[in-house]
Image: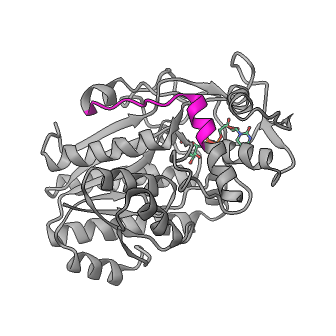
Amino acid sequence: MKILVTGGTGYIGSHTVVELQNKGYEVIIVDNLSNSSADIVDNIQEISGIRPLFEEFNLINREKTADFFKRHNDIMGIIHFAAFKAVGESVQHPLMYYRNNLDSLVNILQGMIDNGIPNIVFSSSCTVYGQPDELPVSENAPIKKAESPYGNTKQISEEILSDTAKTSDLNVIALRYFNPIGAHESAIIGELPLGVPNNLVPFITQTAIGIREQLSVFGNDYDTPDGTAIRDYIHVVDLAKAHVIAVDRMIEKNMNKQIEIFNLGTGNGYSVLEVIKSFEKVSGQKLNYKIVARREGDITQVWADPEFSNKELGWKAEKGIDEMTLSAWKWEQALRK
Ligand code: UFG
């Protein structure tokens, strides 16, 4: 059973390829390596013992995408990760984000329809909820106006999928991720931020290993118990496993409707200071940090109501915060060796 994983050499993509191969799926990766490297294919092989097929091209290229699908019309399902994901960069370069994240989706859907490929799992985000009025946030929470072009591409992508499903046999599962962190237990794959990390955990581990001098904690005047912002951090391997379950569900025709949406989070919120404390505990290191002003665009707090995913998918995030920060730390150390 052949599954296409776009963005399969990226952070969440690579972990998902490993889990798919562990379950016996044949994987073909398409990635243009804009934010990853071809070595990841070797690393995936090292972990799972199986080398996924790999084609390097940009899915915003219509001809190349159409040609790919013609050659691989036996694909049973697609997991579409390939996208730009930096919130701040998307504010600076909106058209780059709209073109990259939306054209690629349109080209993929055209290829699916032209070749009778029925199933797509889409990589969405809890960013579609903005700052929710009620916590925990369930899949029925209202979609708020996007805070950034990046967030808007996730909202529009969900709409494109929904409109396309209405006029075709397409099956869609959109997975709305909370904050993925951590790395594979082998420390052979993990998150590889280019340049200065935007996200909290890579910034913590890079500070601890000496690449960054100090972590800035963005704000301690939020309306939360310790004043720092709260997120629902989820281990990337737990997240990857949910994708395999989503693919199984589509292929086994267990979906309740043509489009399904699931939140992927643990249901637990941790503040920035709590994440730092967890890191200090598992690493035995004191972290050099200081409190600075809030970061523009950040919300106060969000965490998932994972009940629907737990029940419908039979999936539950298993790893706790200490396992997440420890695996991120082991990965950082392995990377610098
Ligand atoms: N933070 C710091 N210092 C840093 C980096 C982050 O204090 O150097 C804080 C942030 O202010 C926030 C928390 O750590 O309170 C988490 O920040 P991240 O940047 O790691 O994650 P976000 O919640 O901002 O963003 C994530 C994804 C986005 C997505 C968003 C909402 O990275 O792609 O969730 O879904 F849009």
The reply to whether the magenta stretch includes residue 101 is no
Viewport quadrant of the N terminus: bottom left
Is 200 displayed left or right of 264 in the figure? right
Compared to 149, does 67 lie above or below?
A: below
Quarter of the picture for ligand 1? Answer: top right
- In the image, residue 251 lies at what x, y percent? 16, 50
Image quarter hosting the C terminus? bottom right
- Residue 8 seen in the current view: no
Residue extent of the magenta highlight:
313-327
Count numbered badges in the picture: 0
On the rendered structure, is 271 left or right of 9? Answer: right
Relative depth, front residue between 252 and 117: 252
Residue 196 lies in quadrant:
bottom right
Question: Is 2 above or below relative to 230?
Answer: below
Q: Residue at x 16, y 57 (%)?
A: 167
- Corner quadrant of residue 138: top left
Q: Is residue 325 magenta?
A: yes
Percent from the top left, x then y, of residue 36? 55, 67
Give the colour scheme of this rendering. one colour
Q: Is residue 310 left or right of residue 166?
A: right
214 is higher (above) or lower (below) than 156: above
Relative to 132, is 261 above or below?
below
